[in-house]
Image (spheres, helix red, strand yellow):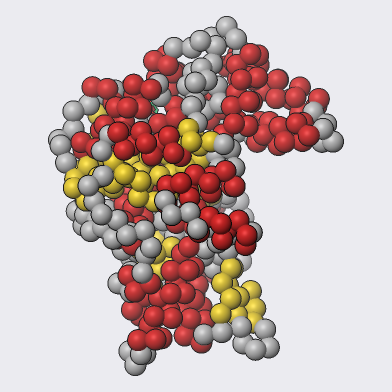
Amino acid sequence: MTRLAEADPSADRSLYDRVPYPGYPYAQTDPDRLATLAMLFGLKPPALETCRVLELGCGDAANLVSLAVSYPDASFLGIDAAQSAVARARALVAALGLTNVALDEEALERMQPTPGGFDYVIAHGVYSWVAPPVRDRLLALCRSALSAHGVAYVSYDALPGGRLKQAMREMLAFHTLGVEDPHERLERARSLLHLLIDGWSAEHEFGAVMRLEAERLLARSDQTLLHDELAAVNEPVYFHEFAAHAARHGLQYLAEADFFEIQTGALPERASEQLIGVDDPLVREQYLDFLKGRRFRQTLLCQAELALDRSPRPLLVMPLAVSSSARSSGSDRSGRTTFEGPTGGTLTTDHPLVIRALESVGESWPGAVWVRDLVPEHAGDDDQRAVCDALLRCYAGGLVQLHMRPPRLTTRVSERPEASPLARHQAESGHLVTNLRHQVVKIEDALGRRLVTLLDGSRDRTTLASELRACLLEADLEEPDDLEDGLARSLEGLAGLALLRS
Ligand SMILES: C[S@@+](CC[C@H](N)C(=O)[O-])C[C@H]1O[C@@H](n2cnc3c(N)ncnc32)[C@H](O)[C@@H]1O
């Protein structure tokens, strides 16, 4: 186990008070994502609308609050030991007037949740960053807090890919030995990274690999560098170790939060065939990590007693909704059309219904379309199966997202547009806001940010235009000739960023 400078892991906890860790929303923790995967793997996940969600090590609750805004009838509990993070979380909850979020300033070791009291448990960025007894406690909490069909999300640094990061960490540990002050540690760490980058030649095997690693670290913010690479504990584990640890706590591996991450299809053909031949799914996943050099996992767990079906059947997709930013990259002369997804996955098809379905999904982005609305009423079983099969393959290839509960957003700008209240609040003070797909989006210009703050559903376009005019006047800026047109374009842009709700 790699510890930095014989540091005390409990000191790390208070370090979160001295240097705040910036929270973000993580779309991969959305209960909709967890439930959809559970359903595809043969489980009956708890109802989403009224679900009970627990986040362990929630930090400033940037993730939990984003979910709470999207699920007004669900209830959310966040727990974290860092006093200042919980204080920031409480301030955010109060500013938004949310009544469905509770926060506990408490160590996981002392938490006593209601047995079976939560349908979805989230622990993002915690497992690898706490000492072994807390890791044990984290999984014990997942087991005891989860309802019978509930799903837990636990992310952690993985091996073998994490070894490169460990090597960097050990060099940084040497260079920062005995330095207590966080700012001085950061300064020393950055100076070592510069030295290494200057000294490692691209022609040298070790240097070529490690240089990229050092550059990646240099690009990180002070806060993440301090709480990640320079943390007292940052322990990557092999997937098989994690799965065995979960099993000791009565939990079993369900899937990864990104379905495409557990597919062998993207590997070269011979490797893919050999892996498909491995019967034990957990062993197959371990080999997949060797081949991918995986360094981070976002694993879903469920109660060990549940029977899983690890080969989702295409027709299970039928009651779901689908969303995708994938676009057609063209058709050949025989009518075969290729669609390319955001992570580079592609699907080529000549099936007219599948082509139409994927085009229609793309046109609805960032919103979602029910699969039943993609299959014409007169379509026969074969056509229905073809569409479902293609969508499941697209899901496996990372081209589409499937949803039991599609994101509550609108792509049509209404007469009195309304932005997410969280985004409105965030736009008051910064350019990073959270959209209704639980992602961070950037609004660069001050006028755009001002516009977001005004979108509370009470103002029509005329009022919005006059408030923007007043804003320009106040800033001593000239009004553009086409303010109304510009406003219309901006509103369309905000809808495209998944910031407007219906
Ligand atoms: C790397 S941060 C991750 C925060 C948040 N989940 C995220 O991903 O943005 C780890 C969080 O775990 C909390 N933490 C660490 N040890 C803890 C413990 N024993 N009990 C409760 N919280 C703990 C820290 O205070 C910190 O907020």
Res 317 → quadrant? bottom left
| Nearer-the-camera pick, 435 or 417 | 435
Using the image as rendered, state which of residue 485 and residue 63 is in the foreground: 63
Q: In this view, does 296 lie above or below 176?
A: below
Query: How many labels sit on residues?
Result: 0
Quarter of the picture holding the C terminus: bottom left
View quadrant of ligand 1: top left
| Residue 136 in the figure: left or right of residue 434 | left
Q: Where does the image place residue 424, in percent across and percent down from the top left? A: 40, 49
**Residue drawn at (26%, 44%), measured in percent from left and top?**
304
- Give coordinates of residue 499: x percent, y percent: 43, 58
Point 49% across, 68% down: residue: 394
Q: Position of residue 388 (x, y in %)?
A: 40, 75
Residue pictured at 42% horizontal, 51% vertical: 281
The residue shown at (40%, 31%) is: 127
Residue 494 appears in view: no
Residue sitting farthest toward the bottom: 378
Along the line of sight, the residue nearer the viewer: 272 or 227? 272
- Percent position (x, y) of residue 207? 77, 31
